[in-house]
Image: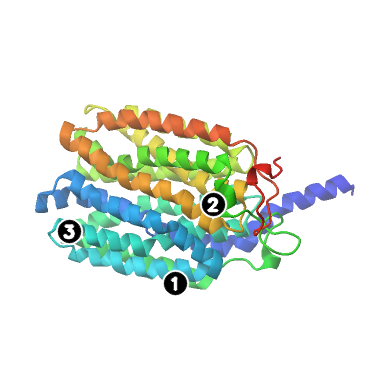
Amino acid sequence: MTAGASRADTTSARPASEFKRGSKPLVAALLGVACGASPLPFNVLPLVMGPIHKEFGWDFASVSAGVTIFGLIASLLAPVFGGLADRFGVRPVALLSLFLFGLMFGSFYFLPGSLGGYFLFWAALGAIGIGSTPVTWSRAVSLWFNRNRGLALGIMLLGTSLAALVVPQIAQRAIAAGGWRMAFPVVALLPILVALPIGYLWFREPRADERPAGVGGADGKVAGITLAQAARGYRFWVLLGSILMIAFAYGGAHIHIAQIVGLHGFSAQVAASVLGVVAIGILTGRLLVGFLFDRFWAPGVAFPALLLPALACYLLMGTDTSLPLVMTGAFLLGFAAGAESDVIAFLAAKYFGMAHYGRIYGVLYMPFGIGSAISPIIYGIVRDRTGGYDPMLLVAMVLFAVGGAMLLALGRYNDRFAEPNSDADPELVRAS
């Protein structure tokens, strides 16, 4: 056998080896994401928004403000939880946060009839739950995978697709059986009874000898630059700005999709089905975009993927669109969401390394969380003042296009990083 053939055989064996070694932590992370604070509130609130509005008389902007408060507090605490994961390991941070999130989300059954109390519940959920989001789970997955990191992160983030497929159906049945309050404790069983036991058994970071080539250095330490070093380079700010624009465009569209569908004349049951189509779009985006990220320059893949929701916004405008076109718009919207979440985790690791990944990802998650949090209330204000969503959907079309185009300025990946305690400027680090 020739040396070239031997190298080819070794290369072809590495992807299977990564998945063989990291399969159990990956499954645990997938379930953790599916049952965590990232998808559950966003898949339950669209279904209880109307009943809450009807029972308490609050306008849609006020009802939406709950998830805004949740997202803002969670986003501000993301770097803190990311730093804790870097320092103490991701396992205790993720599992404890997942447990507390489940308890708090279930307690929403007792939501009070005052806006102040309503907002307080959401604030507590944000403070507790951020550790159960990809801020933590993605660190471990990125340490188990290198050559197939994009696909592995895409599989992990399928948890949000799984939640979007399953949770609205569970919540809708709980609402039908016991009213809108019942949706919260029923859905809260998922993190406590499903994700937590599997996470306890299977979720952990790899030991130094289990890490794939390219994640650690010759000394066994994880390579990467600090947050301060990353912030001195333009790539960090380009990525941050792009994330903010796309999250602002998408967050409100997802939360209000049931209301958007209702304005087209369709029932609540059809609206729940449309949320399922969004989930299928997210699933497709996760896998396809993650697969392509491992084989091509990721910003070049992300840009056209993030143009798709601009078309989705156009299809969702008006009030007389046919159901097939509404479904198409929902699918494209979900596809872009799948691409965007991959962008944050994959590019954070590629451009800044893994040594301080948790803190850097946490800071990059802030615009994602803040944009997603503010967006629903803006969509709600537009709805309250105009009776529809068309002006906001038009703005979202522009934000998707500009945010996607910004990624093209990121340039080539860094293949070497400064030592964790070095003061080297990341812009001077050699790129390939």
Label 2 SS: helix
**Colour mapping used in the image:** rainbow
Residue for point 50% across, 60% down: 137
Residue 285 image label:
none
Q: Dot 3, how many residues are within 10 Å of its Cα: few (below 14), some (14-19), or many (20+)?
A: few
Give the mark nearest the N terminus, 3 or 2: 3
Q: Nearer the viewer, mark 2 or mark 1?
A: 2
Residue pointed to by mark 1: 197
Residue for point 89% across, 49% down: 1
Residue pointed to by mark 2: 153
Residue for point 52% across, 52% down: 155
Residue 177 shows in the view: no
Give the mark nearest the N terminus, 3 or 1: 3
Dot 2 amino acid type? Leu
The quadrant of the image that shows the C terminus is top right
Q: Nearer the viewer, residue 139 or 232?
A: 232
Residue pointed to by mark 3: 116
Q: Residue furthest right?
A: 2
Dot 3 amino acid type? Gly
Give the mark nearest the N terminus, 2 or 1: 2
Does residue 274 appear to the left or right of 33 in the view shown? left
Residue for point 56% across, 36% down: 299
Does residue 325 appear to the left or right of 297 in the view shown? left
Dot 1 amino acid type? Pro
How far apart marks 3 and 1 lie (CA) works out to: 35 Å
Q: Nearer the viewer, residue 410 or 228?
A: 228
Residue 253 placed where, x, y %? 31, 39
Residue 332 placed where, x, y %? 40, 35
Q: Residue 247 occupies which quadrant of the picture?
A: top left
